[in-house]
Amino acid sequence: MKFLAVLLAAGMLAFLGAVICIIASVPLAASPARALPGGADNASAASAAAAAAAAAAAAASPGPQRSLSALHGAGGSAGPPALPGAPAASAHPLPPAPLFSRFLCTPLAAACPSGAEQGDAAAGEREELLLLQSTAEQLRQTALQQEARIRADQDTIRELTGKLGRCESGLPRGLQDAGPRRDAMADGPWDSPALVLELEDAVRALRDRLDRIEQELPARVNFSAAPAPAPAMPTALHSKMDELEGQLLAKVLALEKERVALSHSSHQQQQEVEKELDALQDRVAELEHGTSAYNPPDAFKISIPIRNNYMYARVRKALPELYAFTVCMWLRSRSGGSGQGTPFSYSVPGQANEIVLLEAGHDPMELLINDKVAQLPLSLKDGSWHHICIAWTTRDGLWSAYQDGELQGSGENLAAWHPIKPHGILILGQEQDTLGGRFDATQAFVGDIAQFNLWDHALTPAQVLGIANCTGPLLGNVLPWEDKLVEAFGGAKKATFDVCKGRAKA
């Protein structure tokens, strides 16, 4: 651009010089003097002087006169109009003097540039042109060198990124299983220190190579005239190198941790396998001795050995909304006659005592529904197994209490027309003061619980008797007594137990 500007300026100067030379080479003609309003004498003198100058010019050089007449047109040769008060023309009139009313050129004081000056200007322009060409060539060479350096650095970064990708792609495949595996970067298994040592050597080699690359980076070229800001390649490359180095070190540490974890996991798996083998050996021994080890899903019991506020069992299944229910269970109290505590409690949001079976101290056993209380004529103080059934319906709040298959009492107006709310928490062995917690040790149950079943309707007396004497076992349609639905906490034990056979032995 600078070179084009110089050429354009030189061309303009040459054009202006030529125009000036052409204008200066044309001889000036005397123009008629304008009449002044001051008087007739001045006008006469001016007219005479104009006529004389025109005659002299016509006699001396007729050629230029014709040229300028042709230049200015036919109207330019007409004489001026006669002024009032001027003297009449002589008997021998002079030829009319040419008048130039337009395009009057005025000679300039400065002379046209000579040939020597034009030669000096052309030489200066050539030198400036050569200087610009050399500067452009230098800039081009510098740009090519920077581009080559940038490509080399990009190749190095791609190579390092590829190695890191191979490390990352090899790590998850080698750690999916507990057994040893081999990777393309190492000759030993993952759980051996050989891989860690090889990765450390690779990190050191990469660090040395990065240091050499940093030392070989060229210095930036500084220009005196309007230097353009060069991209901070060394800084970006250094940051990328630090990031890659940190990732490699993190991978080494992760591999070491995974190796330790795999060793620990292998030990745990070995213990679990040994445990399973022991169980299988026991099973084989039982089969060899002819005893059957099969137990149905409901053949278990929950045992709470001491009175406290942390031993209990929780039913994992949520209850629906109920308008009637029958709950039956086998109980054996070990409280020693000081109150049976709480065999079960059902709490819902906003009501901790939605359904509670409780015997506190020497008071009789009570049934609470929505904080309404009914006393039940039941007794469990002899330390033996007893079958308990309680039926209730929201219609008029009717309730019935059975012990060992026999009806012991009934009543009405117990939370009449109140439906049992759904999505609560059912706890065995503790009374809930809040939803699922805040147990009181004085209200805890001590003993064994088995065959806890819940129905959404009232059972008939015959059905209750069949369950109690083990002639008509029946599982609850809302909540059956199954091992997978009951979870023990705080030291409460879940043990295999068939109540129909075990109560005879007890």
Image (cartoon, rainbow, N blue to C red):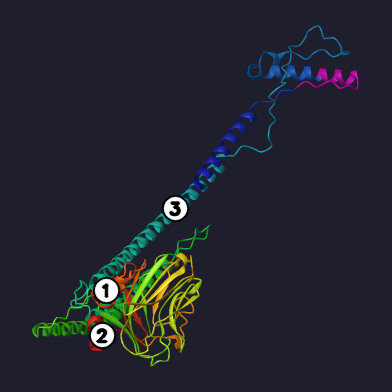
Residue 10 position within the rendered picture, expressed as x and y whole percent measured from the top left: 54, 41
Q: Nearer the viewer, mark 3 or mark 1?
A: 1
Q: Amino acid at mark 1?
A: Gly
Identify the element where label 3 is drawn: helix
- Between circles 3 and 2, the one closer to the viewer is 2
The CA span between labels 1 and 2 is 16 Å
Is residue 322 in view?
A: no
- What's the residue at 78%, 17% (across, down)? 51
Q: Looking at the rendered structure, which numbered label has been put on residue 466?
A: 1
Residue assigned mark 3: 136
Where does label 2 land, which residue?
A: 503
- Magenta-span inclusion, residue 36: yes
Crowding near the residue tagged with mark 1, few <14, some 14–19, many ≥20 C-alpha atoms within 10 Å? some
Image point (46%, 89%), residue name: 362
Please state the horizontal and vertical placement of residue 47, each as a whole percent of the image. Answer: 82, 18
Inter-mark Cα distance, 3 to 2? 108 Å
Nearer to us in this view, 133 or 15: 133
Which residue is nearer to you in this view: 55 or 437?
A: 437
In the picture, the disc for residue 303 is none
State the SS at label 1: helix
Tell me what residue is drawn at x 86 percent, y 22 percent.
36
For the residue marked with disc 3, what is the amino acid?
Answer: Ala
Q: Which residues are magenta?
A: 31-48
Considering depth in this image, is 433 or 262 the residue closer to the camera? 433
Vertical order, 439 against 108 (above or below): below
